[in-house]
Image (spheres, grey):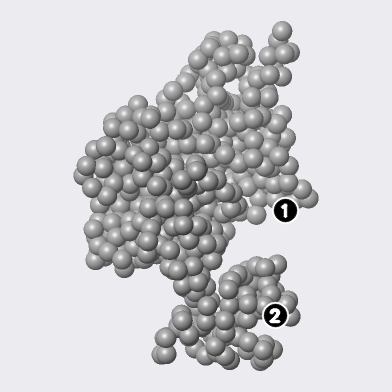
Amino acid sequence: MKLSEIFAPGDPRLIESSADFEFHRITDDSRETGHGVLFCLSEQGRPFANHAFENGSILLIGPDESASPYSRGWIRVNSVARCMGDIAAALHGRPTERLSVVGITGTNGKTSVSWMVYHLWKNAGIRAGLIGTLGVRYVTPSGEMEIKTGYTTPRSYQLQSLFADMVRAGVERVAMEVSSEALALGRLHGTRFVAAAFTNLTRDHLDFHGSMENYFEAKKLLFARTAANRGRLIVYDDGLDSEGYANKMSEYARSLDSEAIVVSRPVDLNLPASFQRINARVAIEAASFSIQESEAFLNSLSTLPAVPGRFEPISLAAISKNKDSIAVVDYAHSPDALLVLLKEARANSDFVITVCGCGGNRDPGKRPLMGEIGARESDLFIISDDNPRKEDPKEIRNQMRSGIGEIRGEVLEIGDRRAAIIRALEETCDRSQKCLVVIAGKGHETVQILSDRTEVFSDAEEIKHAISVIGHRNL
């Protein structure tokens, strides 16, 4: 593809260029550079500009970047982030013009809603795709394709490549998680949405956004992009949002030149957790392109597979005195998500045991809040590690402890997450009450990220292993 095929004369996105280049790939990963590759000086790519240039790549630079070191070939644009997505879309034949893409955003519930939408379509015989925290899935003539990307929302050129693959496979509709970071970084440029849904907004990701208002403004970008295409805008607003962000998003949706759908009641179905009934309501609205589809999808909700790592139950009957006791694996890693999860646990059991930590190199301000909620809402709260990354795990646990005030029962600190899970399950062995052991924070994840290594670690598999160990001891 040539530059002239993307930027027409007078296109305001293009400031200047040293030539009309031909390229076959676009990236901001220096490991993929070479002749015929357009290398973008995004926030991630900028430090590797010289390496990319020396490898023969053409450079896409921003308005303030100096072109003088790169005499051989460069393109200067008004926004690298925006143009990276637009160019990638053009390079791949603008695939989302042939797909119906539905975007789901919010602090909590994105994964569950997108999973439900995908499976509603799939079960109805619609060729569907899914992009999100659980990876990429799409239906092909020979079966279901699964790809792990490592991102909730992949980079713009990765997205456009995935969309193009889906078009070639005959996919018709795509459910996609849209993160606030991806929106702020411009990863969605080049993507056309026919509908967008907002689940909620609570404290998270302030290490990136800096404030709740910046976080909210990033979320609004999805609605603005969707409204530009006259797509449907869906908001769940039951009037119980103490911070008022649901109402603010409802008002914003109504102000745009698009169809705004505000829903306020969960579906009336016996799903494993009450908050999943809310997610199901949003999923029905997002998935349905007609009244007939809405009715059919509502009737098929109960047949959907469970969302991995979201209130995922594991029976403890093999080791517990009360045979109704269970452990639950859940991805809750923000204060509001943990509070909702533990209230659900309290409503479904007599004794609540929680294992929880906070991630390293992430918003430290939420750690005392998580500690306070865990101690207040649990009969036994075990502070443990959860992807400490480059931070001192002991200091993270101390920060969680600093928020603890009123406690319901006992608080322990066991940094080793494997040992913490075993200790939590042991507590159920001799209790006559129905116990619910909440293992929160990692959900579907299969690794523990430490300062010097990444270890294989799955909460669900560790629970099963702990049941085996404890059961063997009790023989």
Residue drawn at (63%, 22%) of the image:
425
Q: Which mark is residue 56?
A: 2
Left or right, residue 241 beside residue 163: left
What quarter of the picture does the C terminus occupy? Answer: top right
Could you say where residue 69 lies in the image, as x and y percent from the top left? 69, 89
User: Disc 2 or disc 1, which is closer to the eye?
Assistant: 2
Pick the front one: 224 or 424: 224
Question: Residue flagged by tag 2: what amino acid is it?
Answer: Gly
Q: Which mark is residue 390?
A: 1
Rounded to the nearest whole Å, what is the CA distance between mark 2 and mark 1? Answer: 35 Å
Taking the image as drawn, is residue 407 in sight?
A: no
Q: Which mark is residue 347?
A: none
Q: Earlier in the sequence, mark 2 or mark 1?
A: 2
Left or right, residue 41 beside residue 100: right
Residue drawn at (63%, 19%) of the image:
427
Could you say where residue 474 lies in the image, as x and y percent from the top left? 70, 10
Could you say where residue 445 lies in the image, as x and y percent from the top left? 61, 41
Taking the image as drawn, is residue 53 in sight?
A: yes
Residue drawn at (57%, 90%) of the image:
19
Left or right, residue 316 beside residue 249: right
Residue drawn at (36%, 45%) of the image:
126
Pick the front one: 348 or 176: 176
| Crowd class of label 2 (few under 14; some 14 to 19; many from 20; radius 10 Å) | some
Q: Are marks 2 and 1 in contact (CB under 8 Å)?
A: no
Query: What is the secondary structure assignment of the residue under circle 2?
Result: loop
Q: Is residue 229 above or below residue 6?
A: above
Query: What is the secondary structure assignment of the residue under circle 1?
Result: loop
Question: Residue flagged by tag 1: what amino acid is it?
Answer: Lys
Could you say where residue 153 lies in the image, as x and y percent from the top left? 51, 56
Q: Quadrant of residue 473?
A: top right
